[in-house]
Image (cartoon, rainbow, N blue to C red):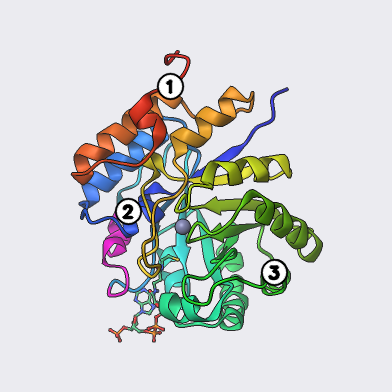
Amino acid sequence: MKRQIHIVEVGPRDGLQNDPANLTVDEKLEFIARLEAAGVTRMESGSFVSPKAVPKMANSPEVFAGLNRGGQTKHIALALNETGVRRAIEAKADEINFVLVASETFGRKNQGMSPQDSADMLAKCAPLVHEAGLPLSATISVAFGDPYDGDVDLGVVGNLAAQAQRTGIAELALGDTIGAATPWDVKRAIDRVRIEAPDVTLRMHFHDTRGAGLANVFAAVEAGVDVIDASCGGIGGCPFAPAATGNVATEDVIWMLHRAGYETGIDLTQMIDTARWLESVLGHGVSSALSRAGAFPKAR
Ligand code: COA
Ligand code: ZN
């Protein structure tokens, strides 16, 4: 049997949170519906953060209220504090992804928290999510480098992972928010986190800021990680990271994986079509390779 790699589509959240375009609720819902039609089964569909901090996510409650709940897709809500977790539960998110931070200065600018503050906040919020009966995952942001402080200590990442495991998360993502990781860093971080948090499923979140995105996906898959974040078109970035660029593009990732014999359950042609449609809605081009070059061999 072919090995399955599970893609978490983050376009509607990470993808849109920093894009110059302001999508309406209906446009976001169409984007989400197209992704679902392409075969996406898990998706970050919005975030419940301060609308002053991230105006592009201000309409997330309306987006969640408008979702088609009859389909296969689980809609993940991002939250960084108790208010966000409560709002996400109220919006009937299928799952909550909590953001931890691995470094001081980015943590202050992004969420007003130190790494330990973010771990304490998760410990405070996790019981609310468990009581609501929802799956809880966490992402350690800037796990491979902070745009202000530079290199991040793997000891901090490991320590956050251990604390996160104790709160009962099911899955932990290591986030390369600013595209600082190399494939060798990825391997080292995975090895370390497996020691510190052996019971959680690992997931990886890469940005292609410095060109190593797909190589990092390869390193993670080779290291046995089965869950990868990606955004349609390769859009995205964090508003609190200078010169941020997009996530690894879903169509590029699935093309590479399918060619290697892995299954993702996502239709490549539909994902490329969605990336091209997205260009018309955003009013600018997207960065993925496959939306420009098309599939090889020609789409089947
Ligand atoms: N949703 C909506 N509003 C929120 C909120 C949430 N989750 N958390 C706090 N607020 C509001 C408060 O009501 C308060 O509003 P007021 O100024 O009108 O009284 C204000 O934000 C400040 O509240 P406070 O508890 O002091 O929060 P903070 O200023 O420390 O902000 C965050 C914490 C996390 C909410 C904020 O830094 C944030 O939204 N950051 C965005 C990070 C992000 O999304 N990054 C990209 C993805 S990782
Ligand atoms: Zn990201």
Q: Quarter holding the N terminus?
A: top right
Residue type at mark 3?
Answer: Leu
Query: What is the C-alpha distance between the residues marked 2 and 3?
Result: 29 Å
Expressed as whole percent of the image width and height from the top left, the position of residue 44 reads 44, 52
Residue type at mark 2?
Answer: Leu
* Residue 289, placed above or below residue 137: above
Residues tagged 3 and 1 counted as in contact (Cβ below 8 A): no
222 or 148: nearer the viewer: 148
- The circle on residue 154 is 3
Residue type at mark 1?
Answer: Ala
Query: What is the C-alpha distance between the residues marked 2 and 1?
Result: 25 Å
The residue shown at (56%, 67%) is: 145
Expressed as whole percent of the image width and height from the top left, the position of residue 152 reads 61, 71
Q: Identify the residue under disc 2.
A: 16
Image quarter for residue 103?
bottom right
Q: Identify the residue under disc 1.
A: 295
Mark 2 or mark 1: name the one nearer the start of the chain: 2
Span shown in magenta: 52-64
Label 2 secondary element: helix
Label 3 secondary element: helix
Label 1 secondary element: loop
Is any atom of residue 91 visible in this view?
A: yes
The residue shown at (73%, 57%) is: 188
Image quarter for residue 131?
bottom right
- The circle on residue 131 is none
In screen coordinates, is 225 left or right of 131? right
Mark in front: 2 vs 3: 3
In screen coordinates, is 86 left or right of 50? right
